[in-house]
Amino acid sequence: MKKITLDEYTLLDSGNLQKLEQVGQFRLIRPALNAFWQPTLPEKEWNKAAGIFKRNSSGGGKWTWKKQLPQTWRVKYGPFLLETKPTDFGHLGFFPEQIDNWQWLTSIGEKLPNLHTLNLFAYSGGSTLAMAQGGMNVCHVDAAKGMVDWARENHSINPEIPDKIRWIVDDVSKFINRELRRNKIYPGIVLDPPSFGRGPRGQLWKIEHHLIPLLENLKKLMGSQPKFMLLSMHSNGFSPNSLERILLSLFNNKGKVEKGEMLIKENTGNKISAGIYARWYNC
């Protein structure tokens, strides 16, 4: 098996509805609900995991640890150093499947330096860092203060990335409506909306009901010369084709769309799908 540098993230293997990950110094097992196949690596490699996260019937889950890990540690993934910690939801603080989208965003930024952009439902800021690295001005919006603080920490440990980021803790829909009233323009927008959620004041979000009205407002916010929109998703009931049709319809069949699955390449040479995306652009 390929030698793993201790500060890297690597997907080692998957199977039996799980994935085996090397997260810096620590090997972890987390759910992979589409991994119906048998693992490629032998059981002894999986037994080296320091922790395993298993979901329960109520939608939550629990970590089981073979040894004590630090509360947080840093991992190099792609171009970024990322603050990492296992959460109660089984997350690590970044989504490895987004790496191709990060590279795409940085390349767009190099073509459109100083473009004003939005990253919505922005989590711990991988896409924010990618856009800022490309030279764009980024407004990072998430309803959870803890996640915005996490994203700010990620920016602070990547000092080579320009300080061109505005940090906002707010409900996404409220923020968009306020910016529309202020006649603000953001020609580039990134969003990875959740399937279900609540804002800081209990605002309900259901993707099947609220996605299209949200996108229609975002199109207004992009002004008369929209440049790009990256829509990624981890929700059931959607496909790359449906995301493509949504974006083409939104932009009146103008511009171009790239679409597909967000894939993570395993150390075994195989790949696993961990979401979908569509990238509309007119630049």
Image: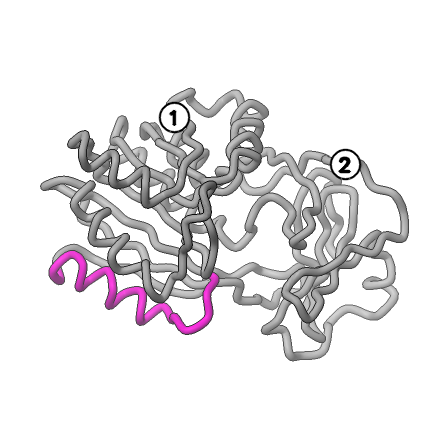
Earlier sequence position, callout 2 versus callout 1: 2
Q: What stretch is highlighted in magenta?
A: 234-253
Q: Residue at x 21, y 48 (%)?
A: 217
Q: Which amino acid does label 2 sit on?
A: Gln
Residue 76 drawn at (x, y percent): 63, 38
Residue 233 drawn at (x, y percent): 43, 59
Q: Say which residue label 1 marks.
A: 166
Q: Residue at x 63, y 67 (%)?
A: 32
In-front residue for pair 194/251: 194
Q: Which residue lies furthest to the bottom in this view?
A: 37
Residue 81 drawn at (x, y percent): 60, 33
The numbered disc on residue 71 is 2
Residue 193 among magenta residues: no
In-front residue for pair 3/176: 176
Q: In this view, does 217 lie above or below 239?
A: above
- Left or right of 115 on screen, residue 25: right
Q: In this view, does 225 lie above or below 234?
A: above
The numbered disc on residue 84 is none
Q: What residue type is labelled 1?
A: Arg
